[in-house]
Amino acid sequence: MKKKLLKFGTLLLVSLMIACSGGQGPKGVAEKFLKEMGAQNMEGAKKYCTDDTKKLLDMMGNFDKMKDKKDKKEPKITMGEEKIDGDKATVSYKEDGKDGDQTVKLVKKDGNWLVEISKDDMGKKGDSKGSGMDNPPPADNNPPADVDTSAKKK
């Protein structure tokens, strides 16, 4: 009886390990993150992020509260290639209606793959998580040459 119970316990443990490991590689985490972002579920997306990325998503969530979400459709995403380099990975994906592939960066922390978005990543052109500013304003405060900035006296 003990042998049968031991075999059953071992089989159950192996089954649980296989079930829990499925989809938790960089590609699986990136896909779950993108689905949550597409559904505009910031709380759900944060499950798959580093702490710094969670803070950025909180800021994005505050901006999204100001927008009307009724007309937004969840984008169709096709997952691409996964590239792992030690504790860092990138996963490419294609979003219907957008040109070219986009990527999600991930890092491995405490044995788990997590999406990592930096502030620099937020403003990149074509980045679905970006600010939407394809042409950010110039960095300097100098007006264009054809604008008269002299003060007019009345």
Image (tube, grey):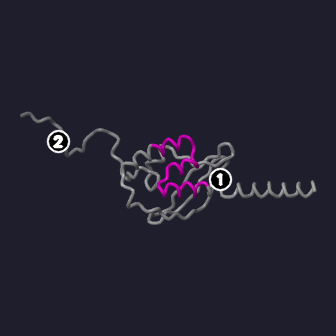
Residue 71: in magenta span: no
Tell me what residue is drawn at x 75 percent, y 55 percent. 16
Region in magenta: 29-58
Expressed as whole percent of the image width and height from the top left, the position of residue 116 reads 56, 46
Q: Is residue 142 above or below residue 130?
A: above
> How many numbered marks appear?
2
* Quadrant that contains the N terminus: bottom right
Q: Is residue 87 above or below residue 31?
A: above
Q: Is residue 145 above or below residue 152?
A: below
Tell me what residue is drawn at x 47 percent, y 66 percent. 96
Tell me what residue is drawn at x 53 percent, y 40 percent. 52
Given residues 63 and 2, the one toward you in this image is 2
Q: Which residue is at the far left?
A: 154
Give the label on residue 148, or none: 2
Q: Identity of the amino acid at label 1?
A: Ile
**Image side of residue 18 versus residue 70, left or right:** right
Given residues 141 and 87, the one toward you in this image is 87
Expressed as whole percent of the image width and height from the top left, the position of residue 40 reads 47, 54
Give the label on residue 84, or none: 1
Density class for disc 1 (Cα within 10 Å; few <14, some 14-19, many ≥20) is some
**Image side of residue 95 versus residue 64, left or right:** right
Q: From the viewer's perspective, is the residue at label 2 or at label 1 nearer?
A: 1
Expressed as whole percent of the image width and height from the top left, the position of residue 38 reads 48, 58
**Image side of residue 67 versus residue 26, left or right:** left
* Quadrant that contains the C terminus: top left
Cβ atoms under marks 2 and 1 closer than 8 Å: no
Q: Identity of the amino acid at label 2?
A: Asp
